[in-house]
Image (spheres, helix red, strand yellow):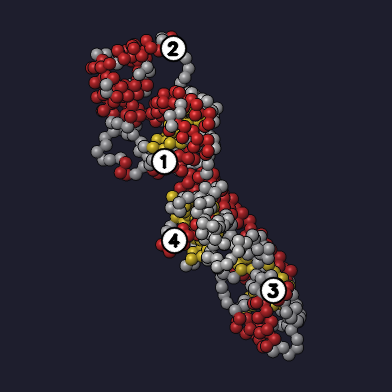
Amino acid sequence: MPDPTVPPTPPVPLDALLAREDLGLRRVAGPSDPGTVVRWAHTSEMADPYPYLLGGELLLSAGVHIPDGAGPGYFDAYVSRIVAAGGAALGFGLAPVHETVPGALVAACDLQGLPLLEVPPRTTFSGVARAVWQLMAQARLAELRRVTEAHRGLASAAARPDPVPSVLHRLSRHLDGRAVLFGPEGTEIAAAGRALGEETDTALAKLAEVVRPADPDEHRPDPAGPPESGAGPGVAGAASPAGRARPRPSPSSAADTVAGIRLAAYALGAGHGFVLGVAAPQRDSGDHTVASVAAVLLSLLTGEQQGGTGAARSAALVRLLLGGDPQEVAPLLGGERWRVVHARRAVRPSETRPSETRPSDTRSPEARPPEVPSPDALAASALGAALGSALVDPADGIVRVLVPAGREPEAQTGWTLGVSAAVTPHDWPAADTQAARALAHARATRVPLVVHGARPALDDLVPAADARAHARTLLAPVAGTPALTDTLRTWLSLHGSWDRTAVALSVHRNTVRQRIARCAALLNADLDDPDVRMNLWFALRHI
């Protein structure tokens, strides 16, 4: 809970007041610490101002309270009360009472480390107070701008194909420190920013445990230690019948300082166990707000997504493992008709590493298969959330997502997508094949999204059994070699383009030429003849 004695505006550095030429303030005693800040200005002529101070004030006085003949003892007591109240500095006004600052006051402030400012006759106390509030307003505006820019940066990072690492990287840059995402087991899932030492890493991991929700079956011991013998059931921290301490509610955030490094931990989501940890050498005004925004974004990226509750998905999985029919299980997942989406990270120049383009690779740029880092589980989960489904399977560089047919998949920044036709669960395997082919077509044609066409075609006029029989007969010479049939299908779908087929299949262009020549020889067909191509395409659609 915020301290009610601290104003919501940022404090003003004392040096900023001294730099105001219109005020003409001059430091005559006390330390020259650039870290000294003023939270407000207050005028008082009380001999003992302690009861009227909250801390952090620039106390302004013209010395009316100073009795005639006051000695060092009076000034020592006066300054000590200001220091005890937490006053930031003392401003002493010249004229009409005193022509100069009393020497005993200067000595007392030097002795007790209280900055003493001389206020010239031309400067009124109200003018000093106004300057303080003006500087506070400027600092507040600068803070709001800084926080707003940080919010925009975090939101942009969350929209990237790798949202979790991007958010952590953006946060670490803003804090000029380190940002870490801890998993439910306490392991470090992702991190960004400069390393701050093993001691800091260990302390941050321990701080994360403070805010991580306790498992119902793993009760945390009370930090006050084990209860004393004879403690009754109403005593906090009393042992349970099983000999374990009762679980305590976890705070949503916690902070600490280790070796001069500021640490903070934020619990993410609705108790799933993810924790955001941040460490920075210094903490500026607004950093907590920015870290809280990052925690909210990471909660959305790591939490349960749409597409059915976790219990329903668990039930569907169990039924499938026990031999249930997909058609019967599908209603538990949220729909009767579905689309399968295959997604692959799009290539960005910044992600191309020198090792990915070997000197011996003589292919043209169009023919080289784009190599990109495989998506991690969190990036795949974020993609699923954008598509409206939590049914995500990241494997072998490809993310497969099962999306209810009511949600039309849209192109996603940083991804190349292939989408199947809407099918019933019985046809999920066929839809998976459709999505894979659509993705290959999208990569080859360099478009972000390709949807499998499900419109009526001429081959619908032929009975399915007859079409399959014709396909088996026509393609028998190559049917036993999947590499040949896959290459022929892709090559025909891309209108005979060698380079695009090489990209789609991630092989060399010459390999495509060799395979197509082999197909032509085995089929004894002229693949330059459009009628031959049409017949082969018809047959390939039915195997």
Residue at coordinates 64% horizontally, 73% vertically from top-left? 86
- Report the Cα–Cα distance between label 3 and label 2: 90 Å
Using residue 505 as the reference point, say whether residue 344 is left or right of it.
Answer: right
Closer to the camera: disc 3 or disc 4?
4
Observer-side mark, 3 or 1, equals 1
**Residue 76 is drawn in which quadrant?**
bottom right
Label 3 CA crowd tier, 10 Å (few <14, some 14–19, many 20+) = many
Residue for point 55% across, 56% down: 247
Which of pointers 2 and 4 indicates the residue nearer the eye? 4
Asked which secondary structure carries label 2, the reply is helix
Q: Position of residue 445 (x, y in %)?
A: 40, 28
Residue 202, numbered label: 4
Q: Amino acid at mark 2?
A: Asp
Q: Residue at x 36, y 37 (%)?
A: 396
Label 3 – label 1 distance at C-alpha: 59 Å
Cα separation, mark 2 vs mark 4, equals: 65 Å
Number of numbered callouts drawn = 4
Q: Neighbour class for label 4 at 10 Å: few (<14), some, many (≥20)? A: few
Q: Amino acid at mark 1?
A: Pro
**First in residue order: circle 2 vs circle 4:** 4
Residue 298 versus residue 493: which sits nearer the camera? Answer: 298
Residue 369 pos. (x, y %): 33, 34
Residue 59 in view (yes/no): yes
Work out whether mark 3 precedes mark 2 in sequence or the reverse, and give the earlier one.
3
User: Which label was assigned to residue 63?
Assistant: none
Residue kind at label 4, given as amino acid type: Thr
Q: Residues within 10 Å of mark 2 (few under 14, many from 20)?
A: few
Query: Which residue is denoted by mark 3 in the rendering?
Result: 59
Q: Earlier in the sequence, mark 1 or mark 4?
A: 4
